[in-house]
Image: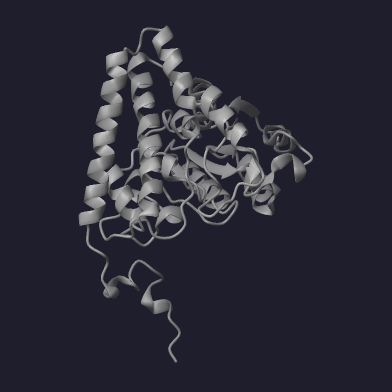
Amino acid sequence: MALTEELAKKMYTDMWRIRMFEEEANRQLGLGNVVGALHLYCGEEAVAVGVCSNLRDDDYIVGTHRSHGHCLAKGADMEHTMAELFGKADGTCSGKGGSMHVADLSLNILGANGIVAGGLGPGTGTALASKIRKSDQVSVCFFGDGAAARGTFHEAITMGALWNLPVVYVCENNGFQQWVRRETVAVVDSVATMAGSYGIPGVSVDGQNVVEVHEAVSEAVDRARRGEGPSLIEARTYRYFGHSPGDLEEYRTRDEVEDWRTNRDPINTFRAYMEERQWLTEREDEEIQEATSAEVTKAVKFAEDSAVPGIEEALTDVVDTAWRVEA
């Protein structure tokens, strides 16, 4: 999909929406309003936006434990997403999924996943379904670099390549596998180089540059939609916050984080790109940030006012009662 001025403004807005949503979610966690674990996406916005800017509403995405950004970039409603983090009945999953399992089936956002590499199988499965139906829908499977060490990774990509499925495997390589630097646990530096083992294209891009991500994924999505099979995209990125609440971040220095925030921030990089092309004025930038801030405030109010699910909801949306074993 060609990057036009109109699309660029939407992408820039989406990056701000993710950034402000995540910062507010972190604040709400401190207030005790967000329930369960919280894995923030700040710093990685260019990946989700660069990928999802190439997708149709009926295309599929499967995420990771760090997936709020994926959902918002794909078009999930901010109010209902925030309510899901609050564990409220008006959440996208009626408050039952929470941060690590947020989903919106109406947009084919099939959910985040708390299991490392857990989404690779379902993402490949939806691609198989698309091929069988001849629907030309594309599936995108997001996963972290740590997932590349799991057997599921190899099994899923082998299946995708063998059956020539319309799937794009997107590795978000933020340099850390929870609290461990990648180079201390992996011999292969770039996950993208592993694509050759499966006979599919593999490319490594700057995950802080949304234009670079958009262009690489555009080619991969077009290829998949034409029936030419899967691709493996590695986006090298960086998370600004710890892995999750309570992370002491002893594996990196504050200077390192600040350097990425100052010199490699994806929003600042894209702003400079747009200003250079006269696609964004200072006033437009202010308006985008003001509107996004208001949207986040409204989302928090919506989540606060939403009801807590009743106890009778505990056994709904699970395995059908016909599967229960009677005593």
Give how far across and how far down residue 325 sits, in percent: 45, 84
Q: Is residue 20 above or below residue 279?
A: below
Residue plotted at (64% across, 40% down): 161
**Camera-nearest residue between 33 and 219:** 33
Residue 290 percent location from the top left of the image? 26, 28
* Residue at the farthest bottom position: 327
Colour scheme of the rendered structure? one colour
Residue 88 visible in the snapshot = yes
Observer able to see residue 231: no
Relative to 103, 63 lies left or right: right
Quadrant of the image for the N terminus? top left
Residue 75, quarter of picture:
top left
Outermost left residue: 305
Camera-side residue: 24 or 140? 24
Q: Which residue is drawn at 69% across and 42% down?
A: 181
Residue at the image point whose x is 43% and y is 38% from the top: 137
Quarter of the picture containing the C terminus is bottom left
Residue 200 at what x, y percent from top left? Answer: 66, 33
Q: In this view, does 240 lie to the left or right of 181?
A: left
In front of the other: 324 or 118: 118
Q: Kindly identify the residue that appears in the image at 52 percent across and 48 percent down.
A: 64
